[in-house]
Structure formats: C-alpha cells, structure tokens
Amino acid sequence: MERLNRTTAQAARYPDKVIQFGEGNFLRAFVDWIIWKMDKSAGFNGGVVVVQPIERGMVDALNEQDGLYHLNLQGIDKGQAVDSIDLVDVINRGINPYRDFGSYLSLAEDPGIRFVISNTTEAGITFDPSCKLDDRPASSYPGKLTQLLYHRFKYFKGDRSKGFIIFPCELIFLNGKELKKCILQYIDLWGLEPEFRTWFEEACGVYCTLVDRIVPGYPKDNIDSILERIGYDDRLVDKAEIFHLWVIEAPDSVAEEFPAGKAGLNVLFVPSEAPYHARKVTLLNGPHTVLSPVGYLSGLDTVKECVEDPLIGKFVHKVMFEELLETLDLPRHELEKFAGDVLERFVNPYVKHFVTSIMLNSFSKYKTRDLPGLKTYLQRKGSLPEGLVLGLAGIITYYRGGRRGDAEIVPADDPAILDLLKSLWATGDISKVAEGVLGAGWIWGEDLNLIPGLTSMLTGFLMTVRDKGMREAVASVVK
C-alpha cells in the first residue's frame, strides 16, 4: 500500500490564505474541513499553512504526507446513516517555528494570507511576561502572533489593507477579546510604536468564536478497514461526527470574505456568540470534562460507554439535567432539548470517543467549563453540586497516575500542575491533596478553599474513591 502524499494521490493545490496555529485532530476535522468545503463549492480558493504552537508536535508527520489526510465523518443526518471518507487537501505545509523561525516570520510577508485561525487549548491564550520580542519564537501563542503581526506591519510599512482576520477557536468565553488583550499587553511590554498598535486595532480583526464538533480523532479501532477503503497508507486519518457548528461574532463583511454560508455549512455570523457559548460549553463540554475521569476510573473507555452504563449514565444525566442545566438562563425547554440532543451525540454508534483523549489539560478545562456552573449552582441552590465536585475528585485521582488494570495512567498537562499533584499525593494525606489543589491560585485565579463546603466535600469524595473505588463514589451521589 502506497504512502499518502501528493505524488501518489491526486490533490488540488490552493494558494496560501490561512495561517493555522495547531495541527491536532480537531482543527483538521473542523476548520480544515470547512475550508475544504469552501474551496470545493464556494470559490474560497485558499490553502492552509500550519504552525506548530508548541515545541513538540506533529508537523513533521503532516509534512511527510504533504499535508494530505482523510476525514471519516459518521453519524445520522436527517434520519439517514452517513459514513463518508474524503481526502482533505487544503494544508500546503507545516512549520515548526522552534526549528525554523525564519520561515515562520516569512509568512507575514505573503500578501495573499488573510486569515489566522488557532486552537491551542484553553491554556493557550495566556500572557507570559517572560516572552521577549527577539525570542525565536516567543513561548506563548499570543506572543508568537504578536511577533508575526509586528513583522507584517513593518514589512508592508503599515499598509491597512494587509491586516489579518483572526479567528481563535479555543474554548474560552470571549476568546477573541482575551487574545486581543494579550496582544495589546505584548505591544506595551515590548515598547512597540504607537503606529503599530493603531494598525493592529484598525487593520486587523480579532473575533470571538464558538466551535462545536465531537472529534474522536485517529480511528485506531477500525483503522485497517479504513485504509482498505481509501487504498493508501494514511497515518493521519481523522474521524468526527456529522454535526458541526461554528458561531463567529463578526460583521457581514467578514462573512463575505469567509463564504461558509455559500458552501451550505453550519457557520453562523452573529452579533453575539454569548448565548451559544454558554449553552454549548456548559451542556456539552462541561459534562465531557467530568464524565471522562469518572468513567475511566469506573472501567469505561468511551463517552458512549459512559452514557449507556446503568450507573455512570445516571451520573452523566445528573450532571447535565440536575446541575449544569440549572445554572443557565435560557428557556428551560430549549435547554432540555439541547441537552437531549447532546446525549444523542454522545451515543453516536459510529463514533468511538475515548475519554482519555478528552482529559488533556483537565484542570484548565474544569476551570472554564465546570467551575462557573459550580459557583452559580451554589449561589442559586444554597448547596454544592455533588456531581461536579465528584468530577473534580476524579480528575485529581486520575492525575495521581498509577495503573488501571493493565493500562498505565499517564496524565497530560502543564508540568507545573503535574509536579504539584505528584508532591501532594506523595504526602499520603487526602486532606492535604484537596486543600493543595483548591488552594493553587495560579491554576484557578483564586483560592477555591474559600468556597463554603468545597474542601470538605472534595476530601470526602477523594477518600471514597481511594478506599472504595469510583463506582461506589458515584453510587453515593446518584442514589
């Protein structure tokens, strides 16, 4: 079987128009697929240059296949089963700025590039004051982007027509405003000229967005049959559900330049993405974040298994309908309809979404997806939401490491967080583990021990999970 690349496969070639920070499964199954659809049916005529946002990544694997990969979409669409496989050919190349900073900066010199799109996880849009303008590159994503913007400003001598349209896809509320704030902080920190600040604010647009598609990623369970279908050795096969939604808070002029509507895609340009964001992050991402460690430590491997398990399924339903749904302000019937649709997506028979793939950077995810609901629930109900607190106990226990059966538990997160959990668990004192995690202000932005009753409840759940196992802990809350 031939290795997939532009020599062995027929593929289109589009001029560079998009810089994409991130090369992971989600961006390739969502943004790059949308661009591919626009190229095929809306005349977008744009290719993508992928920038690896961290030092260790997979642009080498991407370049080995000349940016090509197949996307397998599976699900139910208008009552009909769909199981499609398409060759996505919009990625032209990948750049590792840690190894080739010159090629990275040269992207700023291309007049044809118009869009910058990113998904660097919730932890990616942060301001790191240790970044310097002459770093090669700056360590943070906003720092790298500021370097690129400044080089473009200088190269084109402040030409207002050469600004970028920037779509961050990180799952934080008002992601565009947060990214813009970080860039302005770097402009101030680095003492860059006022003319550049004006150019950035007036020639560039940084827009808030919301993305929604479940992407299990590489289909390791049935990869052999997929390779047989496509006839190539493709090591970057990606899998996703049929459903997709991209909400972009931007004017009609941006929609004209990014013609997703003409391609029949579920991409909405709206005055405010806030209500879409609150609903989606709370009722889809919020449950994902807590069901994953709870399910995994209960012996389950996929989201579908968790929802269909007699006990863990009750936990998922409790978190969604009895806890998180109670924290939202949209009409209840609309919320219940959306939550029901989410549950249907969770049990999509065609998609095997492994819970371990969801648990990357679990602490930052819990902070943005579940902690706001925990606080609102306490404020409205006068008690803590047990399911959400147990979910945090699950994350903390998972981060202890060790083994589940024959499998080694290997959490992936900020090294500082991993070191903190290692040192806290080494004390052998559960109460110190709970107090230490909740008191890590550098993670949460506050001392969560000050939330009434949280330290005690979390300690109790950690003890139950340790002494009796996760399923006993779940049984105590779903009753």
Image (cartoon, rainbow, N blue to C red):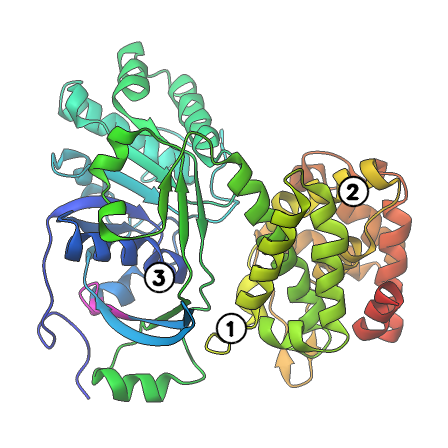
Residue 468 found in image quarter: bottom right
Q: Mark 3 vs mark 2: give the one in front.
A: 2
Q: Find out whether the residues at labels 2 and 1 contact each other: C-beta distance under 8 Å.
A: no
- Relative placement, left or right, of 385 versus 267 is right
In terms of sequence position, does the residue under pointer 2 or pointer 1 come before the other? 1
Q: Which residue is mark 3?
A: 29
- The picture places residue 87, in percent across and down from the top left corner, at 22, 70
Q: Depth check: 332 or 58 in front?
A: 332
Residue 117 or residue 323, whichever sits in front: 323
Residue 256 visible in the displayed image: yes
Q: State how far apart marks 1 and 3 are (Cα).
A: 17 Å
Q: Amino acid at mark 1?
A: Asn
Tell me the SS state at disc 2.
helix
Figure disc tally: 3
Q: Residue at x 27, y 53 (%)?
A: 264
Mark 3 to mark 2 CA distance (whole Å) = 34 Å
Whole-percent x and y of residue 22? Answer: 36, 52
Queried whether the magenta region covers residue 65, the answer comes back as: yes
Crowdedness near tag 1: few (<14), some (14–19) or many (≥20) residues, C-alpha within 10 Å: some
Say which residue appears at 27% left-offset and 52% top-offset.
50
Which residue does the image show at 47% across and 36% down from the upper left?
273
Per the image, label 3 sits on a secondary structure element best described as: helix
Q: Which residues are magenta?
A: 64-70
Task: Tell me the tag on residue 377.
Answer: 2
Dot 2 amino acid type: Tyr
Q: Position of residue 259 (x, y in %)?
A: 23, 43
Question: Mark number for residue 348?
Answer: 1
Residue shown at 28% from the left, 54% from the top: 34
